[in-house]
């Protein structure tokens, strides 16, 4: 009997995701500066959000969650992903683009969700397959739903990604922080913090449910309050990990920075939704600051582990985290300093791309060292 050859998904998906991240943000910004023509698939803010979430972030999720898998399965997913990107960028709204996007989302969901549901033992752990199912459904709905519901779908997707980042970020930080403090002769009593984690899950699930359909303003306000509450709880949880006490672990600190961006972004986004002002600007704390920083560092950590390298020995995570942080600040400031808007957008795109160029260089160095 022939055994199917297995490949670690991150080795294929992470470099491709980093390269796409490097290119897709400038491809959105350069047309605004009059430097390059706009690709049809990036001609609107919604289309830009579509590619950042379902083109870039979903591929990182695939690389992180699939683990070792048959090469044929990974090849199929990559073909669907690549076809979806090409058709969406060149012919958005076409049947080919919609079909490829939907097939990629459904194929990924079918590979991940049933296995995670089966392996979940505690109630809180069902949050992972639930949120992955919500993300896959959002990715499919983004290309099937009427244009009038596009904003609802993208909002739900961003909330689902936020929950995923806080859930997985906590599962990365807690054991690493406990282990590092133990090596330093100290003890970390607050590890996973199940009650706070459970409250975060409930808060963000409530926000997702309230945002999943057109509703009166009062329901929208409940969603905003739930977002802010989830962010505050995440900040409390982060503070209890005492990351400032870690010595010689810049990689762990960088993951903590990404977690903080998500938490602060949820508070800011929820507050802006309640105030009815600057919500689009402030949600970039989640999409650029949180999603960018966490995906960057998860990919850097994953590549180091595959290469059996010390993740704390490289300066790339710190530099990448700094570049992404500057990109986030510049993007948010662009909506407040109108006279400098284009310059700030250019700075945001340049810093974002510099970070992912560093990551690609890191991948190449680790690949040569294997």
Image (spheres, rainbow, N blue to C red):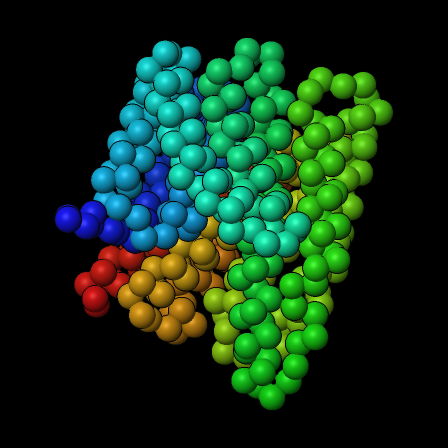
Please indicate whether residue 234 sits to the left or right of residue 71 in the image: right
Residue 57 screen position, x and y as percent: 45, 40
The residue at the point 29 percent across, 26 percent down is: 83
Indicate whether 245 appears above or below 141.
Answer: below
Q: Quadrant of residue 111?
A: top left
The residue at the point 55 percent across, 77 percent down is: 179
Q: Quadrant of residue 121?
A: bottom right
Quadrant of the image containing the C terminus: bottom left
Residue 195 screen position, x and y as percent: 75, 58
Residue 272 screen position, x and y as percent: 75, 35
Q: Residue furthest left?
A: 2
Given residues 117 and 9, the one toward you in this image is 117
Please indicate whether residue 348 sits to the left or right of residue 95 in the image: right
Given residues 35 and 311, the one toward you in this image is 311
Indicate whether 250 appears above or below 364.
Answer: below
Query: Number of marks in the image?
Result: 0
The residue at the point 81 percent across, 18 percent down is: 216
- Whether residue 71 is visible, yes or no, is yes
Please indicate whether residue 196 sits to the left or right of residue 46 in the image: right
Q: Residue furthest right?
A: 218
Given residues 329 and 20, the one toward you in this image is 20
Indicate whether 323 appears above or below 155.
Answer: below
The residue at the point 24 percent across, 51 percent down is: 6
Residue 205 screen position, x and y as percent: 69, 38
- Whether residue 272 is visible, yes or no, is no
Please indicate whether residue 119 sits to the left or right of residue 24 in the image: right
Q: Residue furthest front?
A: 1
């Amino acid at each position: 009997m022939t055994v199917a050859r297995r490949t670690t998904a991150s080795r294929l998906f992470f470099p491709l995701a980093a390269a796409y991240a490097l290119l897709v943000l400038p491809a959105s910004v350069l047309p605004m500066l009059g430097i390059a023509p706009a690709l049809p698939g990036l001609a609107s803010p919604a289309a830009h959000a579509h590619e950042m979430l379902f083109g870039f972030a979903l591929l990182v999720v695939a690389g992180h969650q699939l683990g070792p898998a048959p090469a044929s399965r990974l090849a199929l997913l990559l073909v669907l992903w690549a076809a979806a990107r090409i058709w969406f960028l060149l012919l958005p709204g076409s049947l080919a683009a919609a079909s490829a996007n939907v097939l990629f989302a459904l194929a990924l969901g079918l590979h991940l969700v049933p296995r995670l549901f089966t392996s979940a033992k505690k109630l809180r752990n069902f949050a992972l397959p639930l949120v992955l199912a919500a993300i896959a459904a959002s990715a499919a709905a983004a290309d099937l739903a009427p244009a009038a519901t596009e904003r609802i779908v993208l909002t739900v997707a961003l909330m689902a990604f936020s929950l995923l980042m806080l859930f997985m970020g906590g599962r990365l930080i807690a054991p690493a922080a406990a282990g590092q403090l133990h090596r330093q002769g100290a003890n970390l009593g607050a590890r996973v913090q199940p009650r706070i984690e459970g409250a975060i899950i409930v808060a963000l699930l409530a926000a997702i449910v309230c945002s999943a359909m057109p509703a009166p303003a009062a329901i929208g306000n409940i969603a905003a309050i739930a977002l802010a509450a989830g962010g505050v709880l995440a900040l409390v949880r982060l503070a209890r990990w005492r990351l400032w006490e870690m010595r010689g672990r810049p990689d762990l600190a960088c993951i903590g920075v990404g977690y903080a961006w998500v938490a602060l972004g949820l508070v800011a986004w929820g507050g802006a939704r309640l105030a009815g002002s600057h919500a689009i600007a402030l949600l970039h704390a989640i999409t650029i600051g949180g999603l960018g920083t966490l995906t960057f560092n998860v990919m850097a950590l994953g590549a180091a582990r595959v290469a059996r390298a010390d993740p704390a020995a490289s300066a790339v995570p710190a530099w990448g985290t700094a570049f992404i942080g500057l990109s986030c600040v510049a993007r948010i400031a662009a909506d407040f300093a109108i006279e400098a808007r284009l310059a700030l957008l250019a700075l945001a795109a340049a810093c974002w791309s510099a970070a992912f160029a560093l990551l690609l260089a890191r991948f190449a160095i680790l690949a040569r060292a294997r």
